[in-house]
Image: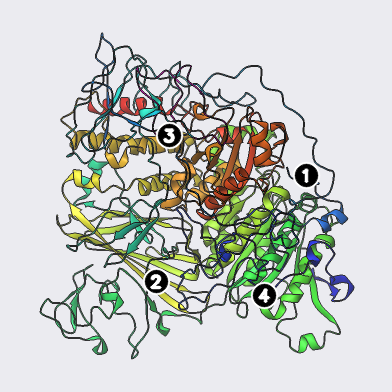
Amino acid sequence: PGLHESRLDRGDAMQPPPGPYGQPSGPYGQQNAPNGFPGAGGAPPGGPPRPMMPAAGPPGVGLPGGPPRGAAMGGPGPAASGPGQFQAQFQGQPQAHPAGSAAAPNGFAPPTAQMARMGVGAAAPPMGGATAIARPPAGGPPTMPGGGPPTTMPGGGPPTMMPGGGPPMGAAGAPPTMPGAGPPQMQGVPPRAGPPAMGAPPMGGGGPPAIGGGPPRMGGAPPMNGVGGPPRAGGPPMGPPGAPPGQAQGLNRYPQPGQAQGFQAGAPPHGGPPPPMGAPPGQTPYGGQPPPYGQTPGFGSSPQGAPMGSHAPSPAAPASSSRIDPAQIPRPPHDAHASLVKHDTRGERGGATHPPPASTTFCARDLGSCNPRYMRSTLSTIPHSGDLLSQSGMPLTLLVQPLALPHPEEEPIQVVENVDGVGPVRCGRCKAYMNPYNRWLDHGRFSCVFCAHTTEAPREYMCQLGQDGRRADWTERPELHKGSVEYAAPGEYMVRPPMAPALFFLVDVNPVAVQTGATTSACEAILRTLDAIPEQKRTLVGLCAFDSACHFFKFPGSGGKEKENSSGTTTKHLVVPDVDEPYAPLPSGLAVPLEANKDDIVAVLKQIPEMFASGRHGLPCGAAAIKACVEALKPTGGRVVSFIATMPTGGYGAVKGRTAMGTAMSKEMEKEPVKHAAPVDKVYSKMATEAAEYQCAIDAFLMPNGHVDVASLGHLCRVTGGSLYRYYNFNTTLDFAQLHNDLRWNVTRPQGLEAVMRVRASAGLGVADYGGFYCKRTPTDVDLPALDCDKAISVDLRYEEKLNDGQDAFVQCALLYTTTHGERRIRVHTLALPVSSVLGNVFRASDLEAQTCDMIRKASAKLLTGSCSLQGAKDSALRTTVDTLHAYRKFCASNNSTGQLILPEGLKVLPLYCLALHKSDGLRSDSSADDRAEWLLRGVSCTASSAVPSIYPRHFPVHVLADGEDGDVPAYPPLPATTWLSAEKLEQDGAYLLEDGREMFLWVGRATSREALRETFGVEHVDALQASHTVLPRLDTKSNKSLNAFVDTLRRMRCSYMRLRVLRRGDPSENAFYRRLVEDRSPAGMSYVEFLCHVHRLIQNKFQ
């Protein structure tokens, strides 16, 4: 009862419709692979340039327009060095197809022919050292600490690019289209009558901030080197697109050894008092008022490398200056990624070394301590006691990324096989794994470095010791000289045979999803990804659709008696109408081997959009459908890959209390926005925990055109170790390429199944808490139904007793998991951390990116509970920043005047990142509930390399990109110089590209010349550029080739495709761009200069 069955004939009913589905497909990996797709020569995404990828390759890089359905999205990568070895291979880049040629790939073009026949969708338009801040003396002009103006050095705008051949990308085919009602007519937008006040991004319906013209500079201070600085009063604007950068004198932003740099005190560049960070009018959160104007401190710097607390004298400032120059306050140094940084994890004398920044391109050599890609601490030298850590104000947290992608020049992690029946050698008391730091007492006994317990090794593992106390075979055994090693797990580490990979695809077929093109896009993305799924003989695939009921498809399996006796019928359509108590229509067999059933799966996917084109209306049952798919996967485990375009308002897990914005409920969401960051009902937590117990992970691809309650659906991904993707205001033309790439990378990236992780620390340290995407059912272990290379788990450490000064502390992460090849493995990473009783040494070893990542993760975790307010999360991040800078000022720079704000060299931009966090979508009070929940869920699992871009994006002036020589496309990297995130840097005749790791915005000024528009975008007027449908075309012009090569490079440097939004000045969607200009004053908070003054005041209050 309650189970309906209908049959689909393999003949007429399952024939693929004409159009994109019927296009011929070439063999996997041949010339019809899209140019620039990482599998065909692109580098993998992920933080800094990460050229490593699995054999199948990371997400593709290319414009909508790729190979036909079924064509390989990348060349066939060589097999990995062994099961479980996630070593990427470089592959040759195919030749680019000329635009419009018959061989031009079309793999990223969204499906439209079928939608045209169905009359859904909309037609696409035609393509067209330490820093010091000093208070001015009372009763006189502001002065800089020390003396005259800062040293200047010649230089000017962004450097020109070196000519070279960039990686070719897919040819520009026709843009993805969705026939239907047709696009809105492009209407000219006349220039605004007058710009709004400078420095204020648009508020509500207001206009964007004024362009050009910054605050007055200090007398005689030239523009900043490399990024052009704010223009002088009456100075010339930036050159037209393509013009070489100016050769103006530039100010050295960061001091060199023996060189001082100062900042003049005075009133901030923006009028009016700085608004408190989210507090009500008249109130200032966390300990004091912002500094009154006229008492704004000035800025100075000590020479790089000077002893802690010693600062070189700074020259005096001109007496006529009364304002702070924004060009001289600390900002992140630009990294062009032009060279490879070599890093040894242990020094020549055997001591641990400080790792390079996570955002740089580095190659690490494992000399006994693990690669910082796998484990990174907020402090690479830790205090000897908990009291000293409390004094520093800094956290002690590890960011563990056990399956991170290595650099291609790094040695792969070696696998230790079970020889003579000897499994991993472990301590008899604490069960820590063998590592290079255990001390061997004789040929058969060793002392554990974690608990000092003496353990006798198995007889087969015994070996004589040399005169130096080392085993004679220490160079032959990886576990005795490597910080990272992987063991083949013996049988006692398994409770059942290793599970096979299983993917259960769930597609939204509600009428709204069909009309917006989400259903067709999801089916086509799955179709184009099937060939890329690894281990197709072992991988199981199931298929389900949902509207107001659940629709399962039973495939014939591997071809047994059922198929022979089916009388020509091969696929069963099973309907589950009871969505209040969802269940699987069959106890097993709904997921079948991919290779043996690929033809049947493809046929059903082609039929689904038309099958449900006139579907029944009812309440969408998305949560119930996910629950039913989990029930179907319980016998085997696996992943539920769901494509959801409508809010689940019916059946199990119905979202009834929280509705879309604009209703009466929206007023409550504005008053108490944080309550909507937690799941709407406990049923979601119960469902997620049950799925994790059966090793089922849940991935959510959200494609809404309204509110879908990301907080509830994303909680399923968080607890089960899945992934969350959201394409707000889903548009097939603009978003299909990213959807396809995200799905392909999701199923091909290095990942582990049914994993369990535990972190151990040496005596005196302990694990306080974990954070990230996981399920914790025991106090010591972290259960991970799925873990991939893009997620990190944070581990907070606590002190249990004092550590020995001058020695090392140790942390070990052990991950037991199943590879996609079906082998059970144990990956062990061991990290050594020097111990010091000198606080100055601890500050020197602070890791800015790791501390920023920890700040983001903790703020996100607090808000996701639904019990912490936005102001509380802001105050917590601000308190951490102030406590850290106060501790440095008090204990490491006490010889300086109390009127100076002293910033440690390694943490000089920590206040900027704190301000950027306050203005992020997760902590802004004006963010929608879904925007906030998505940002928080990404923040709670972010890595050290992805954390900073999520709050402080990179901002490139692309109108000065080099065009290359002799028609060659410029080679990137090196990347061009960036500008700071302020509207002051925007010129009306320029173009700027902003990327935050998830999406890109290309802002085009209204005064851009017609020639530049024609050569770059193929349009005659700037009003032809509209964010709702404009894509970056592929033209045979130098400027267009250079810009496309640059965009392709940025996409390869991140772990996602990053959709590109082209915005002209005055575009209705322009506010999304201005929200990311965090250095300007806005409704979300102060400007950067004002915030520095506010931080200085809070530090001064702590001295009183």
Q: Amino acid at mark 1?
A: Pro
| Residue on which the image places disc 4 | 591
* Residue at x-position 83% and y-position 49%: 179
In the rendered image, residue 243 lying in the magenta stretch gets the answer yes
Q: Are marks 4 and 2 in contact (CB under 8 Å)?
A: no
The vertical placement of 152 against 683, above or below, is above
Q: Residues within 10 Å of mark 4 (few under 14, many from 20)?
A: many
Give the residue furthest to the top.
Answer: 139
Residue at image point 65% right, 28% down: 1066
Residue, disc 1: 126
Q: Are marks 2 and 1 in contact (CB under 8 Å)?
A: no
Q: For this rendering, which residue is in front, 924 or 287?
A: 924
Magenta-colored segment: predominant secondary structure: loop
- Can you tell which mark lies on residue 915? 3
- Mark 4 falls on what kind of element? loop
How far apart marks 4 and 2 lie (CA) works out to: 34 Å
Of tags 3 and 1, the one toward the viewer is 1
Q: Position of residue 411 (x, y in %)?
A: 37, 70
Identify which residue, 67 or 730, lies in the foreground.
67
635 versus 648 height, above or below: below
- x and y percentages locating residue 550 in the rendered image: 75, 63
Q: Earlier in the sequence, mark 3 or mark 4?
A: 4
Disc 3 versus disc 1: distance between alpha carbons?
41 Å
Q: Quadrant of the C terminus?
A: top left
The disc, 3 or 1, on the residue closer to the chain's N-terminal end is 1
Q: Which residues are magenta?
A: 215-244
Dot 4 and dot 1 residues touching (CB under 8 Å):
no
